[in-house]
Image: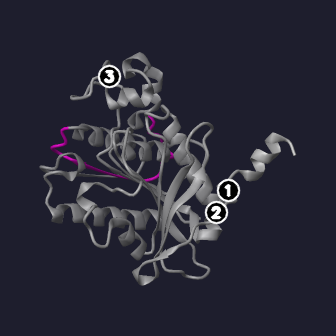
Amino acid sequence: MTPGGLRDLIAAPHPDIAPLPFAAERPGGIRVLRGVPYAEPAGARPLELDLWLPARAPGLPCPLVLFVHGGAWRRGRRDDMGMHTRAWQPGPFERLAAAGIAVACADYRLSGEATFPAPLDDLRAALDWLTLRSAEVGIDPGRVVVWGESAGGHLASLLALARGGPRVAGAVVWYGPADLTTARPPFDPADPATPEALLLGAAPAEVPELAFAASPLRQAHADAPPFLVVHGEADSMVPCSHGRDLAAALRAAGVPVELRTAPGADHGWHGAGEARVREIFEASLEFVRRSAFAGRR
């Protein structure tokens, strides 16, 4: 056998055909599959996702939320919806599954590993894998809503606005950056050390075409799915103008959009009371329900 043939033989199965891991059972018949490989980018670590699946309903595939974590594109964990939800029992993804909605929490390459558009390519690959294995896990690829917070909200926006490839039924964007082209303090597009610059591989002002392509509000178009944009009015890291301007750009393009702002809330809902955060979560869940069923094919 040739060395190349042996390498192929001993390598782990490709994610498209690899057996699914053991499902852990949760109350109410919810199943959780941790660390499911979905892609193997060349020269990079394998990318994984966690699946939260509702109780089995034979013959009735369920809608899906593809969740995208935050962390300034530089850090973060796929199973983290933000500091306010970390102590919830049950947690946010289990709550979605209890409502009959599957959740896929996906890895993506961080800016220390690869620059834009790599993380967006990874999320497209996650959608492709979920579509390929949809019958096996009992999800409906025609009813996918993407939901992201902070940097994940930025990527979720771009995924929903992407032309061609898998189409999503809606997007939930929590305090996501929408514009990488314009100075919005504390962001300076000429600074090569910002998280945005690290994402792009250069100061945004030095790569204006790439910054434009990576700015959701510059990508709004009439064929985009409905959006729910939620932003804290006191956000000191990603100013609320990002959310307001994204909503305005979507409306101008004819896209159904709901904008909610949270008075007194800083980034990550810091400063917002527990009741307000739960209200935002419930409103987001209701938007997912409406979008998923309206988008059924």
* Magenta region, main secondary structure: loop
Q: Position of residue 229 (x, y in %)?
A: 32, 50
Quadrant in the rendering for residue 278:
bottom left
N-terminal of the pair, mark 3 or mark 1, is 1
Q: Which residue in the protein does label 2 denote?
A: 133
Q: Which residue in the protein does label 3 denote?
A: 189
Residue visible at 57% across and 73% down in the picture: 61
The reply, left or right, for residue 236 in relation to residue 257 is: left
- Evaluate if marks 2 and 3 touch, with contact meaning CB atoms under 8 Å apart: no
Q: Is residue 225 magenta?
A: yes
Residue visible at 44% across and 62% down in the picture: 291
N-terminal of the pair, mark 2 or mark 3, is 2
Q: Amino acid at mark 1?
A: Asp
Q: How many marks?
A: 3
Vertical comparison of 179 with 156: above or below? above
Q: CA distance from mark 3 to mark 1?
A: 39 Å
Q: Secondary structure at mark 2?
A: loop
- Evaluate if marks 1 and 2 touch, with contact meaning CB atoms under 8 Å apart: yes
Q: Amino acid at mark 2?
A: Arg
Please tell me how crowded label 3 is: few (under 14), some (14-19), or many (20+) other residues with Cα within 10 Å.
many
Q: Secondary structure at mark 1?
A: loop
Q: Position of residue 109 (x, y in %)?
A: 49, 41
Residue visible at 41% across and 33% down in the picture: 215
